Amino acid sequence: MTITESIRQKALTAILFASSIRRSDPQVGVSTTYWDNSTRNDFEHLVNHLGKTDLPERRKIRELLKWRNAQSVLDAGCGSATEYASYQKDPILKKIKYTGLDLSSKMLAIAQERFPGLNLTRGELKTIPFPDKSFDAVVLRHVLEHQPDGYVDVVKESVRVAKKCVIIDFFHAPMPFIPEIVHLNDKKGFANNWYNREAFQDFLDTLLIKGWFVTKCSGSAKQEAVIYTLLI
Ligand SMILES: C[S@@+](CC[C@H](N)C(=O)[O-])C[C@H]1O[C@@H](n2cnc3c(N)ncnc32)[C@H](O)[C@@H]1O
């Protein structure tokens, strides 16, 4: 990446940060059940927004899964199961054993309608209802920002149930020079937190894993998306 491109990406992330603050209201309560409570228009907008398979982030996740030779995946916070749709575009990943997990029955109903018979479970990511090492890979895409009390429990649970890797795709790239967690309550009722990069990486270093690395690509709002791969 050229220096100019890198500056442009950083500027876009800063603009996104400012717009998250503008859209927040500290008086609004936030909850992970937002996805079940949102109004019809909001919900349809979100489902459409999440429905695109051909994004650089989704392509990168496909590459990482193939690189780890993952035969099974838990799509943690699967929403409408667009990750599954994304894997169907690839001759190898097409055969991956997919499980979707989400708290929202509304999202799961849409996923089931799109893909009848798909393996879907309703549950909370802080207490994943599967035994240790159940899946080669766990994918957390655009999920950690929405945890009202931060990322720690969800990442630990994901590591527990993974055999080969956990792939964390942040919509909001963790940023330097901000507090450990910037708790933002989006006025619509979901947590839209921003996390400090060094604190997040220090946390990864405390986990009993073989290591981790970062991949960057263009995000769905044209900002720099950051994908952490945790090697188990
Ligand atoms: C922004 S959507 C992302 C959906 C999907 N990962 C994608 O990229 O298309 C976030 C999803 O995570 C789910 N979610 C958020 N926090 C959760 C939690 N603590 N337990 C279970 N599901 C959760 C929501 O219900 C919602 O469907």
Image (cartoon, rainbow, N blue to C red):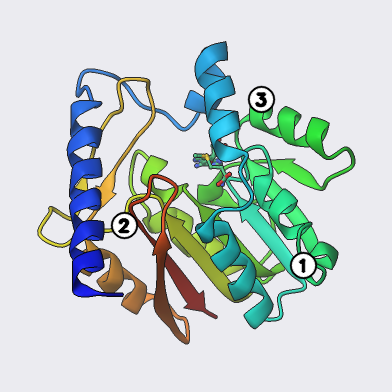
Point out residue 226 in the picture as x, y percentages from the top left corner.
38, 63
User: Foreground mark, 1 or 3?
Assistant: 1
Q: Quadrant of the N terminus?
A: bottom left
User: Foreground mark, 2 or 3?
Assistant: 2
Q: Residue at x 50, y 18 (%)?
A: 42
Q: Is residue 188 left or right of residue 100?
A: left
Q: Residue at x 71, y 81 (%)?
A: 69
The residue tagged 2 is 173
Q: Nearer the viewer, residue 50 or 191?
A: 50
CA gap between label 2 and label 1 equals 26 Å
Mark sitting earlier along the chain (2/1): 1
The residue tagged 1 is 93
In the rendered view, would you say 151 is above or below 166? above
Question: Tag on residue 106?
Answer: 3
- Helix, strand or loop for disc 3: helix
Mark sitting earlier along the chain (1/3): 1
In the rendered view, would you say 199 is above or below 220? below
In the rendered view, would you say 117 is above or below 168? above
Q: Quadrant of the C terminus?
A: bottom right
Q: Residue at x 67, y 45 (%)?
A: 82
Point out residue 32 in the picture as x, y percentages from the top left corner.
47, 33
Q: Is residue 118 left or right of residue 56?
A: right
Q: Residues within 10 Å of mark 1 (few under 14, many from 20)?
A: many
Mark sitting earlier along the chain (2/3): 3
